[in-house]
Image: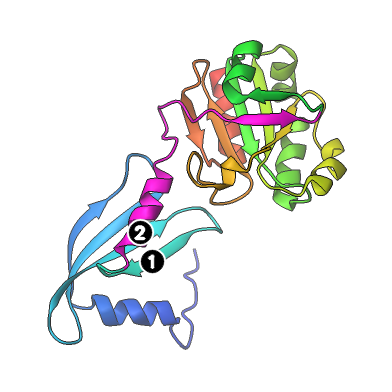
Amino acid sequence: EKAPENPATPPMFCMLMRKKLTNSLLVAIRQPSLERVLYFDFEAVNDIGDKVLLTLSIEIMAKHSNIMLTDENGRERAEWLLQRCLLNRIGEKPADFTFVTKAGRSSTLYRTIDSCKPELTLFFFSNPGCPMCAEITESFSNDPFLQEMIAKGRLLIINIYPDEDLEAWYEHLSDYPAEWITGRDPDGVLHSDTIYYLRAIPSLYLLDTDKTLLLKDAPPEVVMSLCKRRF
């Protein structure tokens, strides 16, 4: 493999870390459960010679990844991010929410699952006109195995639009397969960061028969692979 070429001028963030972390001591590495967040705590010395605790926070979300270097004053933002990422943890039941279907009927995630009784439930948050959302939709709807599982009632796919542009949503309703349940968030609770943390769209969640969360914010190929292994 060819190593990536180093830029002639280091990026500003790299220079900042070099300045702040050179000769520092790594004192702790933290990860909340199986979430995609890592914290590296460093004991360092500031510009006036005082000992300080610096935290390098890394949120791993493919092209939407985040990395922050914070001191004790900025730790509040890092802790806020931690609390958001702890929402709906793998191995637990995710928060229930209300949605309105394209037919105008109100339902909830739990009520829908209890009614359909699938072995697996895949629900993902998407936006109309989103290229990656369209790619996932096409990939899932063209997969013969997934289509067979949907037809047999073993797999339930729920597509939820969390934003407010209803005109765009209605315009793109035909993009979603008829055998999926397609709905929208009527109250805007999904973007309040209180029950779900939608770091990026699309976002895929996979639930077991008893609504236990198996996958969260997972890549589509991982979701598809696990579905095929479970059936």
In this rendering, the count of numbered labels is: 2
Q: Can residue 106 be seen in this view?
A: yes
- Coloured how? rainbow
When the figure is inspected, residue 8 is found, relative to residue 98, above or below; the finding is below
When the figure is inspected, residue 43 is found, relative to residue 80, above or below; the finding is below
* SS assignment at label 2: helix
Q: Is residue 133 left or right of residue 192?
A: right
Q: What number is the disc on residue 68?
A: 1
Q: Is residue 48 left or right of residue 149?
A: left
Residue 47 image point, x, y percent:
20, 86
Q: Of label 2 and label 1, which has the lower sequence position?
A: 1
Residue 172 image point, x, y percent:
84, 43
Q: Which of 70 and 64 is in front in this view?
A: 70
- In magenta segment, residue 127: no
Residue designated by label 2: 78
CB within 8 Å, label 2 to label 1: yes
Gap between marks 2 and 1, in whole Å? 8 Å
Q: Residue at x 87, y 44 (%)?
A: 171
When the figure is inspected, residue 25 is found, relative to residue 219, above or below; the finding is below
Amino acid at the residue labelled 1: Met
Q: Can residue 117 be seen in this view?
A: no
Highlighted magenta segment, given as a residue range: 74-102
